[in-house]
Amino acid sequence: MNGSNMAKHLKVQAAEKTSYFVVGDVITVKITGDDTQGAYLIVEVVSQPGGGPSFLHTHEPQETFHVLEGVFEIYGQDEQGEKYAIRAQVGDVVHVAGNAPHGFKNVGDVPGRMILTYEPADVMLKFFQEIGLPMKDRHSLPEETDPRDPDTILGILKKYMQVIEMPG
């Protein structure tokens, strides 16, 4: 393959990108906005049974979930404010529009793994970098627990326009 075609292709090795521990899940960056001219971000999430941000929240970027391993519920909210769940298994894809209330939870009894795509890219990458604890590699959890207080976490959520939907 000649050099001009090489610029049109990007291969990311499994251990090549940074991983973050985010509220119990491991988020590994795969493709960034720098790689896609700002168009989208792709991350891998590994979630333990019961893991995931199951609370409803919103953010500007649209988000697409592609289940690789395990069973997840992707949560939403209808026009009447009622929460609902979409069960997603291996091979299923669920798309959530930007600013739509959503959340997810690993409802299986084994660790689950998904590819998440966000469009546009930059907001979510910066969010993961600030909210997450950097990991040595995607298999080594941070040695310390998150030292930040809830007000600091809420400040980060607000900074990146992450809105937690309160019931009622």
Image (cartoon, rainbow, N blue to C red):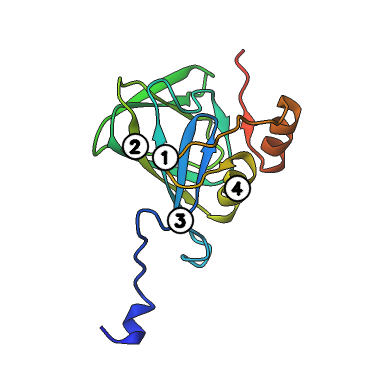
Residue 156: image location, x then y, percent: 70, 38
**Which amino acid, mark 3?**
Lys
Residue behind mark 2: 113
Residue behind mark 3: 17
**Which amino acid, mark 2?**
Arg
Q: Identify the secondary structure beneath mark 1.
A: strand
Q: CA distance from mark 1 to mark 2?
A: 6 Å
Q: CA distance from mark 2 to mark 4?
A: 20 Å
Q: Looking at the image, do the residues carrying marks 1 and 2 touch, with CB atoms under 8 Å apart?
A: yes
Q: CA distance from mark 4 to mark 1?
A: 14 Å
Q: On the rendered image, what quadrant is the C terminus found in?
A: top right
Residue 75 lies left or right of residue 164; in this view the side is left
Is the residue marked by circle 1 packed among few (<14), some (14-19), or many (20+) residues within 10 Å?
many
The structure residue drawn at horizontal position 51% and vertical position 24%, both measured from the top left corner, is 79
Q: Mark 2 or 4 closer to N-term?
A: 2
Is the residue marked by circle 4 packed among few (<14), some (14-19), or many (20+) residues within 10 Å?
some
Q: Looking at the image, do the residues carrying marks 1 and 3 touch, with CB atoms under 8 Å apart?
A: no
Numbered disc in front, either 1 or 3: 3
Q: CA distance from mark 4 to mark 3?
A: 12 Å
Residue behind mark 1: 45
| Residue 68 position by quadrant | top left
**Which amino acid, mark 4?**
Gln
Numbered disc in front, either 2 or 3: 3
- Residue 129: give its label: 4
